[in-house]
Image (cartoon, rainbow, N blue to C red):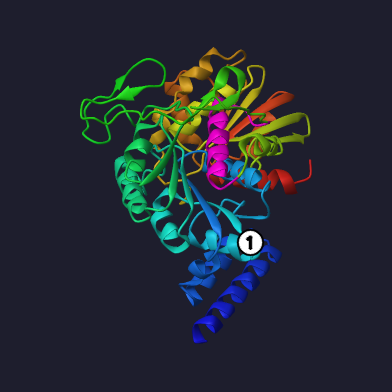
């Protein structure tokens, strides 16, 4: 009885704290509400997860988008609990489950360094792993160590299905520890962290198509599902073809959609029926949203690390101006040396590059120095809203890392134009 009372108090105290946080304009309230509940009852997450079918979505890039797509897929089966705000640590997971107490299905985005903790509490039916690369260098700087920690977490859940990207060697090395695996050829546009084999360190051999392997025996597994980019479809090894109708740009989002559909199928969704729900996702937490501000039409894009930027740069419209925004707060990682691995040199082929690039954000000068070495002519203005005054009327592609993106999106939503 005492345990039940503790849980009741923790749950309601968390909800109250979340509500106060929102009313005071301190944020969405998920993190602080979940933190309060866990402080009062460390077993609250486990209790809230009971008798639910839960999918965890993790990886370095794309986990927020994949979790939104998976939630859309599972809504064809019924109500879904989902930490849609991106609060992806145990407190955010708890808040998502507490907000939807009657939902039998849940999609929880989880930071890759917290998968073991959350999985230990919720015993997931499915874990989705999309990719692994460097991110937040002062927190998780060694990708192989992150992959090893994920592998250890998966070993403790032999009944959990792991839906894993067969094209990412680091993901494959981690996911091979799982007892039940579904391999998806979801694509991998970044190889900067997998030139060497994650198992032995020897150079990986790349062969025809997306195949890769190492003489130590770590090779790309045969996928049961594959993205067919030429006609935007997901196919399985028995000939089923599922059209992928997306309003999200980029080949990497086709991969995210594929992982979401396969994970949904593991949980009982019909891929052909559920695929229609993917078209309902047009932006994810303001990512890809278009905003009219005065004489400018902005499109908001988020890129947090070299892999994310490498995937985002090809999406930029050639006739648009560019506003690039970099912060280095705790949630971003304080170390900005990763900027030197971003292929900013690609921007020199853009028309009008001499006048239409602005570097902004709290670390605008770090970004500006990198652009100088990339021979990208630009203007440096720390405040991103003030920076818009430097750009000609028309389209502006805004690319920002995590806190820079969230701060700018809030300002654009609240400031009058």
- Residue 68, given in percent of the width and then of the height, sits at 61, 44
Looking at this view, is 36 or 233 the one in front? 233
Would you say the magenta stretch is mainly helix, strand or loop?
helix
Q: Can the viewer see residue 285 in this picture?
A: no
Residue situated furthest bottom in the rendering: 1
Q: Is residue 73 above or below residue 167?
A: below
To which residue does mark 1 refer? 26
Dot 1 falls on a residue whose secondary structure is loop
Q: Is residue 6 above or below residue 56?
A: below
Q: Quadrant of residue 96?
A: bottom right
**In the rendered structure, does residue 265 fall within the stretch colored magenta?**
yes
Looking at this view, is 33 or 104 the one in front? 104
Q: Can the viewer see residue 321 in this picture?
A: yes
* Residue plotted at (52% across, 39% down): 62
Looking at this view, is 417 or 314 the one in front? 314
- Residue 196, given in percent of the width and then of the height, sits at 27, 29
Q: Is residue 2 left or right of residue 136?
A: right
Q: How many marks?
A: 1
Q: Range of the magenta residues? A: 247-268
Dot 1: within a 10 Å radius of its alpha carbon, few (fewer than 14), some, or many (20 or more) residues?
few
Say which quadrant the C terminus sits in: top right
Q: Is residue 338 left or right of residue 88?
A: left
- Residue 368, given in percent of the width and then of the height, sits at 49, 30
Q: Is residue 272 left or right of residue 189?
A: right
* Residue plotted at (37% across, 22% down): 211
* Residue plotted at (51% across, 36% down): 364
- Residue 359, given in percent of the width and then of the height, sits at 55, 31
Q: Quadrant of residue 170?
A: top left
Q: Is residue 181 above or below residue 345?
A: below
Q: Is residue 118 left or right of residue 285?
A: left
**In the rendered structure, does residue 340 fall within the stretch colored magenta?**
no
């Amino acid at each position: 009885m005492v345990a039940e009372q503790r849980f009741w108090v923790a749950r309601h105290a968390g909800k109250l704290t979340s509500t106060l946080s929102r009313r005071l304009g301190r944020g969405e309230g998920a993190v602080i509400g979940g933190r309060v509940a866990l402080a009062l009852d460390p077993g609250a997450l486990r209790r809230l997860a009971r008798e639910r079918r839960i999918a965890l979505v993790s990886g370095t890039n794309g986990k927020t988008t994949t979790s939104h797509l998976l939630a859309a897929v599972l809504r064809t089966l019924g109500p879904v609990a989902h930490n849609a705000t991106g609060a992806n640590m145990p407190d955010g997971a708890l808040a998502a489950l507490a907000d939807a107490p009657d939902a039998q299905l849940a999609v929880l985005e989880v930071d890759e360094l917290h998968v073991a903790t959350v999985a230990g509490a919720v015993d997931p039916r499915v874990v989705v792993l999309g990719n692994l690369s460097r991110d937040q260098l002062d927190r998780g700087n060694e990708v192989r160590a992150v992959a090893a920690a994920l592998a250890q977490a998966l070993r403790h859940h032999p009944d959990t299905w792991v839906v894993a990207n067969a094209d990412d060697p680091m993901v494959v090395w981690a996911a091979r520890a799982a007892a039940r695996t579904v391999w998806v050829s979801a694509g991998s546009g970044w190889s900067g962290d997998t030139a060497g084999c994650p198992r032995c360190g020897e150079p990986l051999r790349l062969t025809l198509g997306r195949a890769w392997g190492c003489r130590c025996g770590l090779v790309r597994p045969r996928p049961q599902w594959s993205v067919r980019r030429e006609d935007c479809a997901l196919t399985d090894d028995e000939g089923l073809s599922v059209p992928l109708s997306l309003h999200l740009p980029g080949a990497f989002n086709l991969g995210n959609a594929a992982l979401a559909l396969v994970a949904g199928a593991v949980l009982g969704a019909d891929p052909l029926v559920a695929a229609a729900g993917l078209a309902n996702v047009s932006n994810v937490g303001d990512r890809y949203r278009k905003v009219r501000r005065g004489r400018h039409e902005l499109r908001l894009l988020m890129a947090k690390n070299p892999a994310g930027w490498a995937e985002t740069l090809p999406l930029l419209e050639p006739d648009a101006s560019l506003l690039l925004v970099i912060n280095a707060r705790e949630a971003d990682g304080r170390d900005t040396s990763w900027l030197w691995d971003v292929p900013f040199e690609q921007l020199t082929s853009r028309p009008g590059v001499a006048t239409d690039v602005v570097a902004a954000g709290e670390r605008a000068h770090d970004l500006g120095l990198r652009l100088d070495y990339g021979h990208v002519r630009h203007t440096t203005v720390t405040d991103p809203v003030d920076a818009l005054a430097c750009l000609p009327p028309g389209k502006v592609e805004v690319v920002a890392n995590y806190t820079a993106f969230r701060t700018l999106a809030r300002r654009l939503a609240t400031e009058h134009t």
